[in-house]
Amino acid sequence: MNGSIPGIDAVLFDVGGTLVEQAAPATPVSDLAARPLPGVVETLRSLAAHHRLGAVTDTATMGESTVRALLAPSGIDALLEVVVTSSDMGAAKPDPRGVLEACARLGVAPERTLLVGDNDVDRDAAATAGVAFAAVDGGLPDAISRAIAARSGPFTAAADAVVPLDRDARAAAEARQAQLTKPAGSLGRVETLGNLVAAITGRCPPPVPSRPVVVVFAGDHGVVASGVTPWPQDITAAMVANFAAGGAAINAFARQVGAEVHVVDVGVAADLQGLPGVVHRKVRAGTDDLMIGPAMSTADARAALDTGADVAAGLVAAGHDLLVTGDMGIGNTTASAALIAAFTHTHPDAVTGRGTGIDDAMLAHKTKVVANAVGRVDGYLDPVSVLAEVGGLEIAAIAGLIVGGAAERVPVIVDGVIACAALVAANALVPGVAEHCVAGHRSSEPGATVALAHLNLDPLIDLELRLGEGTGACLAVPIVQAAVRVLNEMATFDELEAQSASEPDDGRR
Amino acid sequence: MNGSIPGIDAVLFDVGGTLVEQAAPATPVSDLAARPLPGVVETLRSLAAHHRLGAVTDTATMGESTVRALLAPSGIDALLEVVVTSSDMGAAKPDPRGVLEACARLGVAPERTLLVGDNDVDRDAAATAGVAFAAVDGGLPDAISRAIAARSGPFTAAADAVVPLDRDARAAAEARQAQLTKPAGSLGRVETLGNLVAAITGRCPPPVPSRPVVVVFAGDHGVVASGVTPWPQDITAAMVANFAAGGAAINAFARQVGAEVHVVDVGVAADLQGLPGVVHRKVRAGTDDLMIGPAMSTADARAALDTGADVAAGLVAAGHDLLVTGDMGIGNTTASAALIAAFTHTHPDAVTGRGTGIDDAMLAHKTKVVANAVGRVDGYLDPVSVLAEVGGLEIAAIAGLIVGGAAERVPVIVDGVIACAALVAANALVPGVAEHCVAGHRSSEPGATVALAHLNLDPLIDLELRLGEGTGACLAVPIVQAAVRVLNEMATFDELEAQSASEPDDGRR
């Protein structure tokens, strides 16, 4: 292996059980001998060529120098730039302070750092510190290989490819707006929308999007077992069949605006392999109940992010020039509320809504479920960990699609509360990516408004929709297209005068 | 002539100068002799076959019996069911009480009544009382012929053809919404919009509108001479040429939504006959300055109403199934503000806006112009008189289009503040006609919001547009179409279950 982990500048290691054999808890320091685990020294040497390395270890009595002395005979000590011990810090994992101290001493941002460890306190410390995590089960070489694979996926590639909005293209669009045959500013938000598309695409005028596509990611949610919705879980699969047959609201809307509908099974809790008209990219058959524990592993969340980014890249490669987010998943307003609460630091009461229609008692229960889940991720700084703990597969996939679209410089119209949850997650993963999106509509779910305000986005449509599927965003497609047409097709006052001058004089001027 | 005036149940006459020769002011009653003017007795006899007849006369001393005695020898007295004198009423024209007393005694609504008279106090009394008016210049037979012609036009025919919204079709649509594959109500206002189209068209499901057309009526405004806008009047003609060439915002928007654009010159102050791509229906070359006096005659206003209704009928006959109102006319936000203030009884300050962009000083002046104009129509009950006094030719034409569309049971999407002014006028002329319309968008002009609230309409789009031309309404076209598609194209839950049951059992249910 070449030992280079994409997007990562520093790798931190737990020591006992990760780099060296775990000593029995009561072994006196004088008896300790650090026996490296298989492949550790070779792996560290390989990593050192590309990354800054350090250790963060919990020990009741040892300071940095003692640990270094123990590790010196194996050659490990020489490969570690920093060694932080809980004894020196006065705080043991899962407290994130040791990890953050190591980052600070290395001068590397937490989001560019990976922690490798062998147990739950390591994982929790990583999530709270906002660093990536790799579990060492199967040995260090294998853990690093998996980390490389995970970080090399389409999502990371897309995230690395996102560039800032093009200020020059936006300025050119603004200047053009002022020359067109209308009073300056009289098209209101349609003008700023056209200018935004110029900034996203980096072109002025941007090409008029002619091949919009709605991507409906479908996934199931274990939390339905906790009684957060009156709809049975198998409605998700039934609606996927409905999408494939063209009988759902999103199909009707998409036909109206000339958009294709791509239905992607990223996590339905039913075998849909036999169903034609569906893109089969299942990461797993639904999440676990987020009321009880993590909805999924960080590897699953990352796989769903990858799926979304990969789907975006494929659709753009196939000629689509406007992406519209859609979703289907019974129970997904619960996961969305939790994600929005966690990422926007908002009280669960303010973001939990009635979804597809629940009564007061069920709403109160749903709010408690959200609050419990959000409580577990309190203080987590790693967005993938939050997404895994309280999110959903289709939500993670939408986040991937958003980042994938931004990477391709194609506008993404985000739909209602599910898409808003994906968008806050995406923006936490790739700060600023929300600027590359168009908020299609304001869902009547309260979390949507919280998320949009958090991201400083003003939606185009506000018609009290709360269906999802991409319906609200789909209605915004012609507005985005019309906004771009303005920049492409309107005459300027100069052109109008020239045209008028070239006509035979009819005495009217 | 057959003596039947469409839409009119009662005809009231001034006496001196209208039915009989005008006596010199100081003639003693004992010397008065009522000499009928030419053709009067024959005209009254002809009218009496179809209408209730009466007289409303100003006289310093005579009561009803004295007037009747004077008229008896000519045979006129016997043809008049009621005779109201100012002496009996204690109020002379232009006070409307005599006219209203005659209506009440005949048991006929003012809006079904025509007053015929020979001078300004008659005209003003009619406007204030809300009755139609015909001037007797040229003699009574000619005045009645003109009244018949005026009342027989396309606008009156359309107004008479408007039927109430179809409650059964709406109820059927509501019932269907509840069966479709979505939680009840989850499409929010898109559902009520689809149901409204069912009620307008009288069909469930209504056909999906496939041939939308934007009708841009263009007219000039004499009030530009009073300094209410920085734009010169000839921009109106230049923009008409721009529409015809396809270079304006409305052309770009219409292309996006698949709508045709019909440009109708109903009152541009320039000769556009040589311009191709324009429908030439000029009533007159711009209005007079409404700051100084009436913008136009009631005959002109009625001709513009007729034009709008006639254009609507022609477009529907040509297969268009969705009408979108558009306008062009430098200065028309001033006329619109005056109309909205007058019809909604709102203070001019609250309805006068910056139009295409004016500074504080010009806004203050514009507000004064509006206030002066509105003051003149204070108490007018005849909507045509209000439209003539402070309106515009393109605004009256839009009102005609609205009524024409309703008569044809075709939805009309109304645009911004100009269309809103036309809509309040139309709704005053044909009470309830606004229910047949879809409010396309909320213009940022304050008068639009006042008018929409007055009519209890909630617009579909709110993007701070203030251009006019039909741009905002045009963006609402796909929403209306999508709303109707829902009723036509979505599967029901029963169908979804049947479809699922007919599939090979894959074990997932």
Image: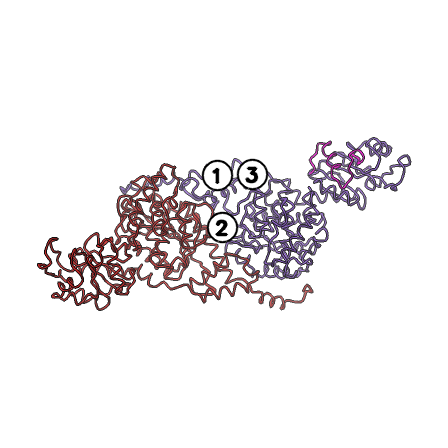
Chain colours: A red, B purple
Mark 1 chain: B
Measured as percent of width and height from the top left, residue B203 is found at 52, 40
Q: Amino acid at mark 1?
A: Ala
- Residue at label 2? B478
Residues tagged 2 and 3 counted as in contact (Cβ below 8 A): no
Is B478 placed above or below A46 here?
Answer: above
Q: Quadrant of residue A103?
A: bottom left
- Which span of residues is magenta-colored? B84-110
Residues tagged 2 and 1 counted as in contact (Cβ below 8 A): no
Marked residue nearer the N-terminal end (2 or 1) = 1
In the image, taking residue A501 as reference, residue A72 lies left or right, namely: left
Query: Looking at the image, can residue B319 be seen?
Result: no
In the image, taking residue A310 as reference, residue A180 lies left or right, namely: right
In the image, taking residue B46 as reference, residue B444 lies left or right, namely: left
Q: Is residue B96 magenta?
A: yes
Measured as percent of width and height from the top left, residue A210 is found at 44, 58
Marked residue nearer the N-terminal end (3 or 1) = 3
Marked residue nearer the N-terminal end (2 or 3) = 3
| Cα separation between marks 3 and 1 | 13 Å
Q: In this rendering, do the residues under marks 2 and 3 share a single chain?
A: yes
- Residue at label 1? B173
Helix, strand or loop for disc 3: loop
Mark 3 chain: B
Please name the residue shown 27% across and 49% down the image.
Answer: A296
Task: Classify 10 Å Cα crowding around label 1: few (below 14), some (14-19), many (20 and above).
Answer: many
Q: Amino acid at mark 3?
A: Leu
Task: Classify 10 Å Cα crowding around label 2: few (below 14), some (14-19), many (20 and above).
Answer: many
Mark identifier at residue B111: none
> In terms of depth relative to the viewer, which is nearer, A404 or B448?
B448
- Residue at label 3? B165
